[in-house]
Image (spheres, grey):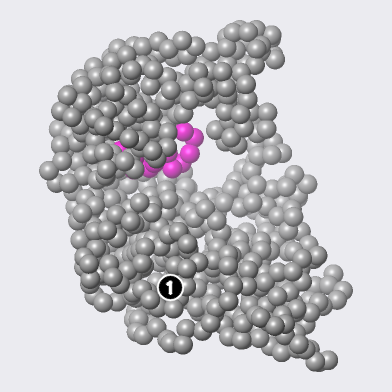
């Protein structure tokens, strides 16, 4: 496109840049572009594409010495749907990332590279006069939920339906009747072309993973399945909010029907509406095995025994004999999760981030589970000089070695490629649950539920329950004979018994505890990683405004704040998100459920 030329006269306009600062930038321009039009502007020593939002009425900061000019106006008209712009403004406030960063997440990267677009030439019909409604549909059987969602699609309305993972979205797409599939688009790969297809109205139905929430049309029905799943809990890029909250807000803006569903509800949905529990687990298909009564296997170099209960060995053998696959699950990679000196007890930690290293590759190599740094096992302890190292908290590699002594066909699931010619015992982390639909396991065994419950995170109990619930229900049909075996000591067995009572019992107990401790969803928890040079100043400012700040005292550690005074906190932090300070802005993560 040719550059816009200007006369001598000029006016001031505000432009939102897809960047971390929260405020717009002001420029001179010969004309006032239409709200939402893209413009090319100078920013520092670079040139950026931003969004014009109208004539400036701001009082410019005192440090502004001159006003720079718009270089080019790309669009004659606004190409951003009004509901998406409102969603960007709302999510920028809610996630503390600003409208600019929210727009960068909402719109495809090509939009801010100047890719050519033209006006639709039509208005989406209907929907906007509807009143927002919210309905819940929680059923642990995937097929039952799919049937219900298909009923909604048959209403001949524009529909956006979201799933926690693309694999589940693709499975639903394939399950559609032919007449609906012709009207539907599966949102993945070549996103720019898919984005344009939806923008120009070629598809009535969009089926997507959580990122598809920003599809550029005006859905009359928005459905989100598995809204309690970790993949929906927060988007990987700004705006870092729950996909469910974004979907609900968009439905409110559009006046659309909103439906939340899944195998079990999130804390927020249960807290607000307590959905009905349709099905519960069957007692005879849950096996609780006391890990204190086990066959013990010793792995060289691991200062911990591998505990194989009689129930685990018996039911694994039965399933494989019946030509059924078996999953063993432990959320620990490598040989051991911790390596220490046998003489002085010194634990080996990452030189980059200080996290405890875990052993891999037969114990010869170490890897940091946080930053990914890899190291070679040292030939001696830097603290005492001893050459004797050992491992604690046996990982999957150790369990794999133990399992091979009992079963002939054992696999370690480390990626998405797993070719099976006959039934097998497969070891992996909870990611292995993604294979339930294809491999149809007859038994899913959790090797040490007590270790799963030991993580110092307020969401730990929910994550464990969600994994156990998924182990029982994921990919299951009404006639399935799949069993779930849980190896645990007394604490874990008591928790596993909640699985038999269902999600209502779990959430009633869990929310009671969270209320007593003032944890989400009763309050919001903010994790703020501050630049060292500003950390003390930020803490003093927060404490002067009567915020209770939790700080470990270490320069590199984040501070934590639990509060409902969201607007006050935002105003305290706002100056740190001005363009002049942006290289030192804090990183903010918010936990709301």
Give x and y (percent) for residue 285. Answer: 17, 34
Left or right: 578, with 113 as reference point: right
Give x and y (percent) for residue 229. Answer: 38, 50
Compared with 363, 6 (above or below) is below
Name which residue lies at 42% across and 19% down: 398
Examine the rendering and report whether any part of residue 257 can be seen.
no
Name which residue lies at 64% across and 51% down: 587
Name which residue lies at 12% across and 43% down: 479
Specify few, some or many for label 1: CA neighbours under 10 Å numbering under 14, 14-19, or 20 or more.
Answer: some
Front residue of 320 and 95: 320
Give x and y (percent) for residue 230. Answer: 42, 48
Examine the rendering and report whether any part of residue 528 can be seen.
yes
The residue that mark 1 highlights is 197
Left or right: 345, with 43 as reference point: left
* In the image, residue 465 lies in the stretch drawn in magenta: yes
The residue most toward the left is 479
Residue 30 is drawn in which quadrant?
bottom right
Residue 54 is drawn in which quadrant?
bottom right
Front residue of 119 and 393: 119
Q: What secondary structure is marked by label 1?
A: helix
- Magenta-drawn stretch, dominant element (helix, strand or loop): helix
Q: What is the magenta range?
A: 455-468
Front residue of 22 and 238: 238
Name which residue lies at 58% across and 85% down: 77
Give x and y (percent) for residue 149. Answer: 25, 64
Residue 273 is drawn in which quadrant?
bottom left
* In the image, residue 1 lies in the stretch drawn in magenta: no
Compared with 474, 155 (above or below) is below
């Amino acid at each position: 496109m040719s550059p816009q030329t200007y006369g001598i006269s000029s006016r001031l306009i505000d432009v939102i840049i897809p960047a971390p600062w929260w405020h717009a930038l002001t420029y001179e321009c010969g004309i006032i572009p239409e709200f939402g039009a893209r413009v090319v502007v100078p920013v520092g020593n670079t040139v950026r594409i931003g969004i014009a939002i109208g004539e400036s009425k701001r009082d410019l900061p005192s440090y502004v010495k001159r006003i720079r000019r718009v270089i080019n106006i790309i669009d004659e008209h606004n190409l951003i749907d009004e509901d998406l712009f409102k969603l960007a403004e709302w999510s920028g406030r809610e996630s503390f990332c600003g409208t600019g960063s929210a727009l960068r997440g909402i719109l495809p990267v090509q939009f801010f590279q100047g890719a050519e677009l033209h006006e639709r030439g039509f208005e989406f019909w209907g929907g906007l006069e509807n009143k927002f409604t919210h309905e819940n549909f929680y059923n642990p059987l995937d097929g039952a939920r799919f049937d219900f969602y298909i009923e909604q699609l048959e209403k001949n309305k524009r529909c956006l339906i979201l799933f926690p993972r693309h694999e589940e979205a693709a499975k639903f797409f394939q399950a559609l009747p032919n007449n609906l599939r012709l009207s539907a688009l599966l949102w993945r790969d070549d996103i720019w072309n898919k984005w344009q297809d939806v923008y120009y109205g070629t598809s009535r139905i969009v089926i997507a993973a959580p990122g598809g929430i920003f599809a550029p049309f005006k859905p009359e029905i928005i459905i989100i399945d598995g809204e309690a799943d970790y993949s929906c809990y927060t988007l990987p890029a700004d705006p870092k909010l729950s996909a469910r909250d974004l979907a609900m807000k968009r439905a409110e803006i559009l006046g659309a029907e909103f439906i939340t569903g899944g195998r079990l509800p999130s804390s927020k949905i249960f807290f607000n509406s307590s959905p009905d529990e349709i099905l519960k687990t069957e007692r005879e298909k849950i096996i609780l095995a006391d890990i204190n009564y086990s066959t013990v296997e010793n792995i060289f170099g691991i200062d911990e025994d591998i505990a194989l209960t009689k129930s685990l060995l018996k039911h694994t053998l039965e399933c494989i004999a019946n030509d059924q696959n078996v999953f063993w699950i432990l959320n620990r990679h490598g040989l051991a999760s911790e390596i220490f000196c046998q003489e002085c007890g010194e634990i080996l930690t990452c030189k980059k981030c200080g996290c405890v290293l875990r052993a891999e590759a037969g114990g010869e190599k170490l890897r940091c589970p946080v930053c990914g740094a890899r190291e070679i096992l040292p030939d001696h302890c830097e603290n005492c000089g001893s050459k004797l190292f050992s491992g604690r908290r046996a990982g999957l590699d150790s369990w794999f070695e133990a399992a091979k002594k009992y079963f002939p066909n054992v696999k370690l699931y480390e990626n998405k490629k797993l070719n099976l010619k006959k039934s097998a015992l497969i070891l992996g982390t909870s990611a292995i649950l993604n294979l339930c639909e294809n491999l149809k396991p007859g038994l899913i065994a959790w090797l040490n539920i007590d270790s799963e419950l030991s993580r110092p995170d307020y969401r730990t109990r929910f994550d464990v329950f969600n994994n156990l619930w998924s182990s029982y229900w994921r990919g299951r049909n009404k006639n399935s004979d799949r069993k779930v075996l849980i190896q645990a000591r007394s604490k874990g067995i008591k928790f596993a018994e909640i699985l038999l009572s269902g999600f209502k019992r779990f959430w009633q107990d869990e929310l009671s505890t969270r209320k007593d401790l003032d944890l989400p969803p009763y309050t919001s928890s903010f994790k703020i990683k501050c630049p060292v040079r500003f950390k003390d100043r930020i803490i003093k400012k927060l404490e002067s405004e009567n915020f209770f700040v939790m700080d470990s005292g270490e320069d590199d550690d984040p501070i934590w704040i639990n509060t409902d005074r969201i607007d006050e906190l935002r105003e305290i932090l706002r100056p740190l998100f001005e363009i002049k300070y942006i290289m030192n802005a804090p990183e903010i993560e918010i936990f709301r459920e």
